[in-house]
Image (cartoon, coloured by chain):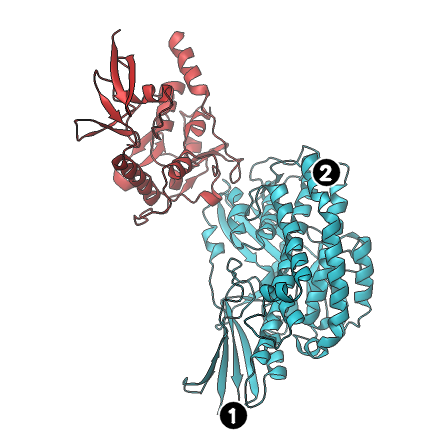
Amino acid sequence: MAQQISINPVTRIEGHAHISIQLNDAGEVDDAHFHVTQLRGFEKLCEGRPFREMPSLTARVCGICPVSHLIASAKACDELLAVRIPETAIKLRKILNLAQMVQSHALSFFYLSAPDFLLGMDSDPAKRNIFGILEREPEMARGGIRLRQFGQQLIETLAGKRIHPAWVVPGGVNEPLTPEKRDAILAGIPEAKATTQRTLEWFKSILGDYREEISAFANFSTMFMGLVGPDNTLEFYDGQLRMMDAGGNIINPNIPPYEYQDYIGEAAEEWSYLKSPYYRPVGYPDGLYRVGPLARLNIAERAGTPLADAEMEEFKQLSLQERMSSFYFHYARLIEILHGIERIEELLHAPDILDPRVQATASANSPEGVGISEAPRGTLIHHYRIDTQGIMTWANLIIATGNNNLAMDRGVAQAAKHFVKGEKIEEGMLNRVEAVIRAFDPCLSCSTHAVGQMPLHIELLSPDGAVVDQVQR
Amino acid sequence: MSFKTFKIDDMDLSAAEDDTILQVAREHDIFIPTLCFLEGLSPVGACRLCLVEIKGSSKLVPACVTQVQEGMEVLTNSERLQKYRRMVIEMLFSEGNHICAVCVSNGHCDLQYLAQRLGVDHNELPYLHQQKPVDASHYRFAIDHNRCVLCTRCVRVCDEIEGAHTWDVMSHGIDSQVITDLMQPWGDSETCTSCGKCIQVCPTGALFKKSKAVAEMVKEHEFLPYLKTMRETK
C-alpha cells in the first residue's frame, strides 16, 4: 500500500518547512519533496515607499542575515543614485558583510549541524543539539559560540547593533570607523582564527566516517553560480557573477547585473511558497544550479588570503565529482570562515580605512537599480524600479536560499531513496533526510529559531489519508 | 503684573499671572508630556497629552493653554492622567502607520519617545489606518502622511515664523491630513520657500529630507525661540 511520510517541521534550520516522502506499494521511497510553508510578500510591500527605506526595510526579511540584505539593497540603491561610492565605505561594507558570513556560518556549523557529526546521526534527538555538544565537547561548543560572538560583536561595533543596523545606507555608510573600534575588532581575530583552524582540522579528520552521507547528500552534477573577484578569487561583495557547469567549465564568465533575468528564470510550484529559480538557457526544471559556500569554492580558483588559500588547495584536490556532494557545504563553510577572518584583518589594516569620507549623497538619478552580493547562503539579488520622485514602483528579490530550492528538493529525494527503507522507519533515517537540508543551511523565514524544542512529527499515511503509524519526539 | 501662588504636585509655587501651568512646570523640572506644543509657536491645546487635573474640578485642562490661578492645586501625574495619556498615544498609533524600525526618525522621534516614557508597551485599539501616499514631489523634502499625527506644528511654523502659510489642514476625523497650498503636490507649491522649518519642527518622521535614510533624520528646533524673539524685537 502506498504511504506518505511527513517530516514536519524540519528541525535545526532557519525558518519553517516540511518534507514529505511518498512510499510505493512495496514500501520503497517513490518520491520526496521539500515544502516551504510560509509567505512573506516583501516585494509587494516595498511598493510606494521611498527607496532610501529599502536597505532597512528589506533587511527585515531576515534576522540571521539582515546584513546581506542591507548590502544587496544598498548596492541597488547606489545604482539609483548613480554615483561613485567612497572607497572606504566599500571596504567597511565588505567587513560588515564578511562579519555576518562568519557569524552565520558559525551558527550553521556549530549550532545546527555539528550535533549530527559530534553526537551522531542516530543519536538521541533530545540531546542532538548545541546543549548536547556542550555536555560532550564543551570546548568545541564554547569555540563555536565565541566565533559567532566575534561576528555578531563586529557587526555591533561597526554598525551600532547586531540585528537590523541602519548603518549601511544608499551611497555608503553613515559613520566612519574610529581607531578604537578598529583595534577592538582586531583584538578578537587571533582567537577566531585559531578556533576555525582547529575545527577545520577536526572536520577533515572525520570526513572518512561520512562516506555514505557524502555519496547521498544531494550529490549530483549541477551548475554552480556565484560572484568571483579579480584574479578569480573568492568574493562576497562585488565582482563578476559567474556560472559554472557540472564539468567545471565556466559557461558565463560575467553576467551583467542588469541582464540577470535573461539567465535566471523563476518558476513557481504548487507544493512550495518558495520559488524555484533556474538557469534560463537550459530551461525548467533541468536548469537547476546551486549557490552558497560549495558553489563559491568550486567557482573561485583561490581564496586570496594565505591560510584559506592553503585550505582551498587541499579542497580542490578532491575530484570535481566529489565536490558535487552537498555534504561538502559544511567543509566549504569552514574554509570561508577562515577566509572571512583573514580578509577582515586585511581590510582593517588598509591605510584609508579610517577616512571620514564614507557617504556619497545624491538624488534619485536612475530609474532602475540592481544589487548583487554573496550572502552566507549564496548569491542575493535585489532589483528595484522607482518613479522620478524616488518612490518604489517595483521590486524583485531573489534570495540566496531560493536559488538552491530545486537542488534541495532533488537532494531530499535522493537521500530519502538512499536512507529510508525497510519495514520500520528509524528516526535516524529521517534525520539524514533533514540533514541534507541543513547542509544547504537554508534561511527560510530567517527569524525563528528553536533549539531542541521543535518536535519532529512523522506520520505514515495511507493513500486515503488515514494515519497508519506515527512517531513523535 | 500680579503674581499667583498655587501648587503643582504638592509643591508650593508662584508665578506671573499670565504664565501657563506648562511653563511653570517646565521651569521646575516637572514632567508634563506634550506633542503639539513647541516652544516658539503659539499653543493650540490639540493633542491632549498635557492634560492635568485641578483639585475640585472634574474637568481635565490642557497645561499648555491654561494659566495659573491663585490657590490652584494641580496634579500632573495621577493614575487617571497616565491612563488617558497612554490612550491618546494608542489612538495615534491606531490612526497612523508608525513602524519605527524603517522610519527616518527612528531614535529621534517625539512620538516614539513619548510612547516609551508613558509606558505604551502594546496597543489595545484596532489599527484603523488607511494606506496614505508619500508626497515626494518636492526636490529636497518629502511627506509621509502615514506618519503624520496632525499636531499642526508645520502649519504654525510656516504661518507664524516663515510667513508663507503653505501648510494647512483639510477634511475631518480620520480623513484629516495636512496639505500644501490647495492640496497640490508639494513640488508644485508656489508659496513654499523651501526653508525647511516644517521639517525641523515635525515631531515624527512624517516630514523629512529626501537625502536621509532610516534613523538618519535628526530634527533640530532650537532655532525657534531665537527666531521668534528676533521677529518680535525688529
Quadrant showing the N terminus of chain B: top left
Mark yes or no: residue A429 visible: yes
Q: Is residue B228 above or below residue B33?
A: above
Q: Is residue B156 above or below residue A292?
A: above
Q: Quadrant of residue B158?
A: top left
Mark yes or no: residue A373 visible: no
- The residue located at (58%, 68%) in the rendering is A405
Q: Colour of chain A?
A: cyan
The chain coloured red carries which letter? B
Q: Which mark is residue A353?
A: 2
Q: Is residue A98 above or below residue B12?
A: below
Give the x, y percent position of residue A343.
Answer: 75, 49
| Left or right, A339 with reference to A172 | right
Q: Is residue A129 above or below residue A175?
A: below
What SS does tag 1 mark?
loop
Can you identify the residue that label 1 sits on? A25
